[in-house]
Amino acid sequence: MSISLVIYSQESDLFEGPIFDTENNLLYFVSILNCLVYCYSPETKEILSVKLGSPTSNVYLTNETKIVLAASKKGFFEVNFNDLSAEFKFQIDIPDNMRYNDGIQDARGRYLIGTMGYPEVIEGMANVYSYSNDQSKILIKNTSISNGLVFTENDKTLYFIDTPTKKVAKYNYDIETGDAEFSEYIIEFKDNGSPDGMCCDNDGMLWIAEWGGSCVSQWNPKNGQRLRQIKLPHKNVTSCCFDKDNNLYVTTAKDETSPYSSGSGLFHIKLNNSQNYDTY
């Protein structure tokens, strides 16, 4: 296994939301508080950015090359990295003291997006929304920091993280109606780290970024066991995604509690087949 730092910025407090376009070999991610959406080419090492007018939390892929949909507090924008432009598309009716956080698109094209208090976290006042055909509905109610969202391959299960609970929840998902029903908690974090963003590998195992835990970890959702832990030189690890070769991109955030902490980072982790714990 090897870990490489792709991009580092002392001026960015919160890198988040990596998503990989395997067809075009491009990585997208955001700097939430800097209101930036990034497009990174692993092939050319080029990094492009587009600035939106408010905190920007999540990116959805489209069928167009270098054109994505990005969620910012002021709405959802089509971001075109071919000409570095942004066009407003729609907004969901959320309270002024909330902003968007993690999101995902289901197999029918619905946009799922969680919220959290802004500028301060408000316990139990956030939600996860679903949007399609110019209509939105609340999918999961009364969360605090809505984070990782992952579907199983058959679209019947949605995994979700409300970070302060330190748990991963399982929901039964109806792809026909777009409704989610709570089933059970499947993973609980008992160490310093709290679950943040996550993704799923080809074996159905969950990879979870640990805020405050300095690592990304692999978990078996069937028995709640941690299989692997990869340490990173940043305390606050925010999210992760796989590239076309099944290696990991991982985003991190600045540690606001430490005056010596580095800023946000984007890491690339080339995985091996060892099931032992790996340390950076």
Image (cartoon, rainbow, N blue to C red):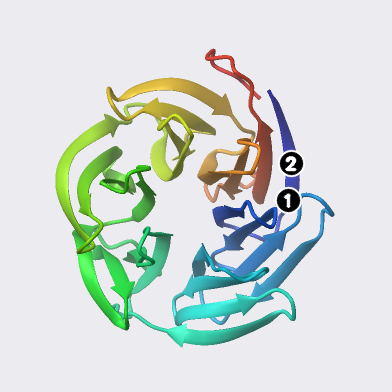
| Secondary element type, mark 2 | strand
Residue 10 image point, x, y percent: 71, 55
- Is residue 109 visible from the viewing direction of this image? yes
Residue 47 image point, x, y percent: 77, 61
On screen, residue 6 above or below 61: above
| Secondary element type, mark 1 | strand
User: In terms of depth relative to the viewer, which is nearer, 101 or 247?
Assistant: 247
User: Is there CB contact under 8 Å for labels 1 and 2?
Assistant: yes
Seen as rendered, the residue at the extreme right is: 44
Q: Residue at (72%, 79%) from the top-left corner? A: 84
Q: Residue at (41%, 84%) from the top-left corner? A: 90
> For this view, does 1 lie left or right of residue 136?
right
Q: Which mark is residue 8?
A: 1
Q: Residue at (40%, 32%) from the top-left corner? A: 204
Residue 40 image point, x, y percent: 72, 58
Q: Amino acid at mark 1?
A: Tyr
Q: Residue at (61%, 32%) from the top-left corner? A: 232
Residue 186 image point, x, y percent: 24, 32
In the picture, which quadrant includes the N terminus?
top right
On screen, residue 203 above or below 156: above
User: In terms of depth relative to the viewer, which is nearer, 131 or 63?
Assistant: 63
Q: Amino acid at mark 2?
A: Leu
Q: Which residue is mark 2?
A: 5
In the picture, which quadrant includes the C terminus?
top right
User: Where on the picture, by quarter, is residue 29?
Assistant: bottom right
